[in-house]
Each structure stands twice: as structure tokens, then as C-alpha cells.
Image (cartoon, rainbow, N blue to C red):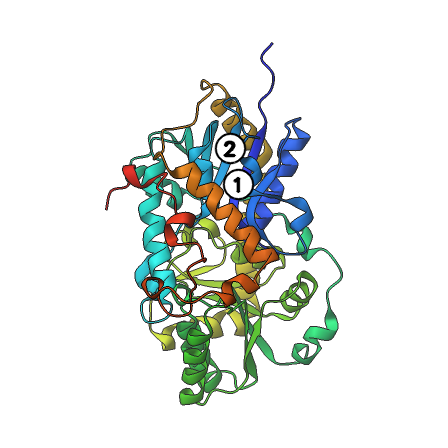
Amino acid sequence: MTPRPRVHQVLATLGYGDAIGHEVLGIQRALRQAGYQSEIFVETADPRLEDLTIDYREMVGAVGASDILIHHFSIGSRASRTAYALPGRMVLVYHNITPPECFIGIHTDLVKLCFRGRRELTAYVSRCTLALGDSEYNRKELESLGFGRTGVLPVVPDFTHLQGPPDRTFAAGFDDQWTNVMFVGRVIPNKKFEQIIRAFHVYRTRHNPRSRLLLVGSYSGFEKYRAMLQGLVARLGTPDVHFLGHVSNEELTALYDVADLFLCASEHEGFCVPIVEAFYTRVPVLAYAATAVPSTMDGGGVLYDTQDAGEIARLMDAVLDDPRIEEAVLASQDSALARLRARDFAGTLRRFVEDAAAAPPRDAPEVPWDFWPQFDQFERLEELRQFRPALYKALPEDPGLGAGRSALEPRAASCEPRAASRDVKS
């Protein structure tokens, strides 16, 4: 009898409290319950989750031709390129990459990373046994890029992070007779926080002066965008707009408890898990009908297709001011959530894994001759960076590397080996 393959996952970062992190941990639980040996390989992990992961470099020599790698692709990374160059059958799970033009003028480095990530994705067309989107929207994008065998691994959110005791102290200042409008998501341009702020400004000015806006999500790396948003708030003269940053699960639970409306204006989403979190916590949702959002809502909540802040404010008032409308919206969300939770996530995952396992074992693909020497050099330099950081400060700058970098620092080529570049189409 053929031994059961090991089924490991690889991704750039395992974050605490984010949608991909919850899905990765859910996949590992389902695989282990099905009897598969399964580890999670990452470049970095939140300190609260590090003990659940293994450094991606440990994949080298540990992953064989008979194994299966579930590769979570959301942006190009060293972990991705290493996974590409290893033996084993690959199942790619695509979480979508935001179009780079969304970050022009806000985050130059991310413009480059998103462009390179979208370009790099095409290199996996021939590498993958199976390519999965976590929504039908993402699956269609994979299909349009030329992936032959595609499918949807449905996101069935694990709500255990919202089932613990809420941190009521954190939300105590918002637990009053005022109306709380909330959005949850990283403070990045494609989520159109400025549109949320404008709609709230009109709602507060014309309909309900006893209201506030709670914006929940990390803005790390996007301080410039946050400053632009704060400038907009100042120009509008709108009080009671709160940027709460990254919060713990207990704090998030408390915020959902006090929220009266979840307002989403995002123009690009691969799924948008906070929408179904709002369904779960029975907060009515009003969301812009773009990209994957309509399929995520699946008939629940209220979709709108206007950019007019006044129109959005009137919809907000209609939902919040009429208990009958609010109850109808909540009932539609309850039904949509029931359909989502009825999906057999574990069974679907097992079928995809069995499908990949039926393919013949796969040796490592051909990569440039210097790929593995570069890999080894980068690892040695990383060890020096970690244990002898003063070396980088002691050496003179190499003018060819640019200001602020020493000659010992790893060049771009050392962390971007050309494993995939030969197949990439510009």
C-alpha cells in the first residue's frame, strides 16, 4: 500500500488575527484530524504563533517528491521561491494580490512588490498540480492567467477568536446611546477608508449627530495614508472618528458587541472575512458591490453600487432608523451565514488533497545553476545579521548598493533567486 503523503503548508507570514492566518491554522487542524502529517513553514510569524511554525529554510531536504506542499500565495516572497524550487506536488491557494496601482503615491515599495507578485504568480502555472482560489472571484483570476486545474477552497471562517470573553474595558467609552458605525480591515488604500469617512460625515451631519465611526485595523507601513485620512477628517470637520489600530481578539469581540452598523467601501477584496464576522456577531452590513464582496455576502446584508456619499448615508439611515428593515437585513445575514457554515470545508480540502495525491510524485523543477548557492549565501548572511549585527555597521558603504547599505548586506538577487523568472511573462 502506498504510504500517505505528508501535506505541509508554506507562506510568507503567519499573522495573528488575520484571515489567512485563521485559514492556515484551520487547514492544519483538518489535515491532522484526517491523519496527515502537516507542518507550517514560514518566513516570519507573529510571536504569539511562532511555536506553531517552522522556518521555511527547514523545507530544504525535508520535503520530498511524494509530499504535497499547500502554497498560500498572496505576494512574492523568499518562501514562495524556495517552495517553487523544491520537489513535491504543489497545491497553490491564491488569496489575491491587490492591483499595484492602488498604492501609487502611498507606498512605493508595495507598488513594486504587488507588481512583482502578480508577475511571479504566472510562473506557477506549470509548477502546480492544482490551483485554488479562496473565492470564485480568485478562481476566475487564476483561470484567466492560464492555470489549467482550478477550484475553490471555500473560506469557512473559524469564529473561535470571537467566542472568548470581550474586553469591555477597551470598548467602554463606546458603549452608550450613540450609534457606532464600524469597519474592520487593514488601513490600506484599496479599502477606501476615505469613502467610509465621507459617507459617515454626511450621515452624522444630516441624519444622526449622536454617532461615531470606529475604524479598526493596523496601519503599520501605511502611516502616510493614515495621515491623509486624518487630514480629510480635519478638512470635513467631522468629530468622533476613531482610528483604533490593530486590536486583540478580546478587544475586537467587544467592538462587535457595541457596533450598530458595519460599513464597507472596499474596491478590491479577494473575500473580506470581516463581513462574515459581522454576520456572525449580528451587526447589519452595508457594503460596496465590488470584486468578491457580493459572493461573500451571498444575499445577506445590503449591497450598494454608488460612490455618492449622500446616497450611502441615506442607506445607512434607512437600516439604522427602521427596526423592521434592520431585522430583515439581519435575517438575510443569518441565512447567508448558515449557508456558508454548511459548506463541508474539511471534506472539500480532503478531496483536493486526494486529487493532488493521485498525481505522480514530482521531482524538483529545473532552476538556474546558481539558485542553491545563492540560497546558502543568503542564509549565512542572515545568520551574521542576527548574531553579528555590528559587522554591517563597521564596513564602509559600497556606492553601488546605495546609501545606507553596506557591502556585506545581501543583494536583491540573494533573496530573489531566479527560480521562477525564466517562466515569467512581463
Residue drawn at (52%, 28%) of the image: 68
| Quadrant housing residue 8 | top right
The answer to whether 87 is drawn above or below residue 166 in the figure is above
Q: From the viewer's perspective, is 174 left or right of 66?
A: right
Which mark is drawn over residue 33? none
Residue type of the residue flagged with mark 1: Val
Which mark is drawn over residue 69? 2
Judging depth in this view, the residue of 53 and 199 nearest the camera is 53
Q: Earlier in the sequence, mark 1 or mark 2?
A: 1
Residue type of the residue flagged with mark 2: Leu
Judging depth in this view, the residue of 90 and 306 nearest the camera is 90
Residue drawn at (63%, 59%) of the image: 281
Residue drawn at (55%, 80%) of the image: 212
Judging depth in this view, the residue of 207 and 117 nearest the camera is 117
Which mark is drawn over residue 10? 1
Q: Is residue 250 visible?
A: yes
Measured in 3D between alpha carbons, the distance from the residue under mark 1 to the one under mark 2, in whole angstroms, is 7 Å
Residue 231 image offset from top left, x and y in percent: 42, 84
| Quadrant housing residue 257 | bottom right
